[in-house]
Amino acid sequence: KPPPPPGPLNDTSTKLVNNPAHPFLPQRNGDMRGPCPGLNTLASHGYLPRNGIATPAQIINAVQEGFNMGNDLAVFVTYAAFLVDGNQVTNLLSIGGKSSLTGPDPPKPAIVGGLDTHAVFEGDASMTRGDAFFGDNHSFKENQFDEFIAFSNKFGGGKYNLTVASEFRWQRIQESTATNPNFSFISPRYFTAYAESTFPITFFVDGRNEDGALSLDVARGFFQDSRMPNGFFRANQSIGLDIIGSLIDFIFEPHPIQPGGNQGRVNSYTVDPNSANFSQFCQLYQDFVNNTVKGLYPNPQGVLRDNLNTNLGFFFSPLQGSGCPQVFPFGQ
Ligand code: HEM
Ligand code: MG
């Protein structure tokens, strides 16, 4: 039976996290890294297994300890990714591509392909990674980081801040609309795109720094090298769903766009009324379970079904008391 997720940290103060117990070490042959600079960095500093294969509990502990991510956000995001990209029987997830180290595969159409898997969690219009349509959705792209720099210079006085986050998020959407005929920007990607635009501010800025601005060399270290700067302190408070939600509002407001996508040709962005938007958080949860998870596991049996149900319960746990009704695609 999969173990329950860890609880919140007792001590959520800032502290040195690039420390002697967690040195940066370069990737060895075979170590998995992927589209998430946060998890890549935690693996390269030994907060996660350095081979990039981890359990949900290891990921939740690592994001809390290493970056002060709040427990509700950590549990929700980790189980979302684990349910679609991880192995429900062995309890292992690759933070990069598919790996035999996560164990034997369940029956198709399940994928268990790690975080690189396109369209179940990973999606288009990422800041520093390309759209899957162009062939590689997980490697750092210098040309996109050049834009990150240009926008930080133009709107942030040489640093990435909330204003830059808003303008650059919009630019990434415009660029995918103009270049990717298959551009898709519906739930869950619609939500994660905005959330991830806040993360460099909340998690990559040193916890002793009060101005919410990320210098570009520190940004490059995380995004490209999976590396914390020397002497790095984590955030000075736990950053959960409430804080990220208000920062998303700030990023969204100057350039609102409804979920949708291109129609097989560039510059054909069409709103998809069936996708959840920011006023429909419960539908984000519900569609993820009933469409995305159930699409991969149409008829699970035995221990696979039992573990899916257990992990769906853990996924819902941060929403207890939110007013969203829990859904049970595999029975109760
Ligand atoms: C992107 C997973 C925590 C920072 C991503 C992506 C995935 C992912 C799958 C790719 C989405 C895409 O851009 O298409 C996770 C999971 C987490 C987690 C399962 C567990 C809690 C974190 C943390 C940080 C972080 C703690 C910061 C310290 C980012 C950033 C991006 C990203 C900045 C956007 C990368 C870009 O657009 O270039 N994450 N993440 N993540 N993640 Fe994470
Ligand atoms: Mg992406």
Image (spheres, helix red, strand yellow):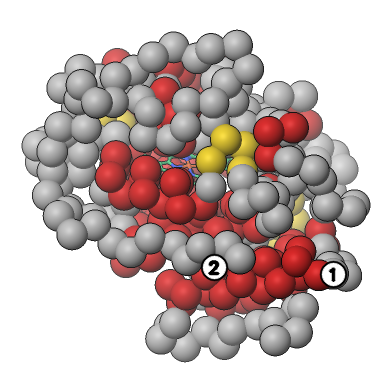
Q: Residue at x 20, y 25 (%)?
A: 19
Q: Residue at x 34, y 17 (%)?
A: 24
Say what secondary structure mark 2 lies in.
helix
Badge 2, how many Cα within 10 Å: few under 14, some, many 20+?
Answer: many
Q: In this rendering, does residue 49 appear at all?
A: yes
Above or below: residue 278 compared with residue 179: below
Q: Is residue 275 left or right of residue 56?
A: right
Measured from the top left, where is residue 38 in percent x and y?
42, 36
Measured from the top left, where is residue 42 in percent x and y?
39, 32
Q: Residue at x 38, y 28 (%)?
A: 46
Say what secondary structure mark 1 lies in.
loop
Observer-side mark, 1 or 2, equals: 1
Quickly name the residue at label 2. Answer: 315
Q: In this rendering, does residue 37 appear at all?
A: no
Front residue of 234 and 123: 234
Gap in angstroms between the C-alphas marked 1 and 2: 20 Å
- Mark 1 residue type: Gln
Measured from the top left, where is residue 210 in percent x and y?
10, 41
Q: Earlier in the sequence, mark 1 or mark 2?
A: 1
Q: Is residue 22 left or right of residue 329?
A: left
Which circle marks residue 58 in the picture? Answer: none
Q: Is residue 308 left or right of residue 61?
A: right
- Mark 2 residue type: Phe
Front residue of 118 and 245: 118
Quadrant for the C terminus, please: bottom right
Instruction: Choose top left, top right, bottom left or bottom right for residue 160.
Output: top left
**Tag 1 and tag 2, C-beta contact below 8 Å:** no
Which circle marks residue 301 in the picture? Answer: 1
Quadrant for the N terminus, please: bottom right
